[in-house]
Image: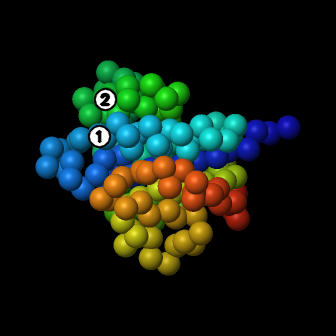
Amino acid sequence: MKTKQYIIFLDIDGVLNTKASWKKPFSLVDECIKNFCTFVNRYDVSPKIILTSSWKTGWSLLRENQTPQIIELQEKLSKYDCSVFSRTQDLGNRQKEILDYMATHDVDFYVIIDDDDTEYKGFDQSGVYIINAETGFSENDIKRIKWKKTLHKAK
């Protein structure tokens, strides 16, 4: 029997850091990371984390090709048994990039975690969770985020 694929489409700024921390580029807030990973590990589904953030340009399959901020992100996530699996392609906007990813990969369930709702106009909002950039990913977010079943399968 095929294992169901759970995908988290993740933005970084305003999610794994806070608006106050943006003064320092590529900052991360440990509490936000801890809360996010608590969500990731909440159910026994082993979700894959896919970067949608502008940070994604620094991600690579090979660690030696990753930017210092992605290496730091991976190290902080690994403390909680989490890691970035992949990234979306650059197609001009996140909605297109996520739809492209879902059209070309087996995705059974997903969530989109971002702090900017303007990226998802016309998108099925039941799978989109907007994080308050003032607080970043909080304990309340752990409880409120629910998996959305994918209606279409990859070709």
Q: Is residue 113 above or below residue 62?
A: below
Q: Which mark is residue 28?
A: 1
Foreground residue, 103 or 43? 43
SS assignment at label 2: helix
Under mark 2, the amino acid is Glu
Check contact, mark 2 vs mark 1: CB within 8 A. yes
SS assignment at label 1: loop
Furthest-bottom residue in this view? 122
Q: How dense is the environment of label 1, judged by Cα within 10 Å: few (below 14), some, or many (20 and up)?
A: many
Residue 35 appears left or right of 92: right
Q: Is residue 120 above or below residue 141?
A: below
Residue to which mark 2 is pinned: 72
Furthest-top residue in this view? 64
Q: Residue at x 52, y 27 (%)?
A: 81
Q: Is residue 79 above or below residue 37?
A: above
Q: Residue at x 28, y 52 (%)?
A: 18
Q: CA distance from mark 2 to mark 1?
A: 9 Å
Under mark 1, the amino acid is Leu
Q: Dividing the image into 4 quarters, which one contains the C terminus?
A: bottom right
Q: Residue 100: percent from the left, percent from the top?
A: 52, 58
Residue 59 seen from this side: yes
Q: Residue 124: percent from the left, percent from the top?
A: 57, 72
Q: How is the image coloured?
A: rainbow
Q: Residue 88: percent from the left, percent from the top?
A: 44, 49
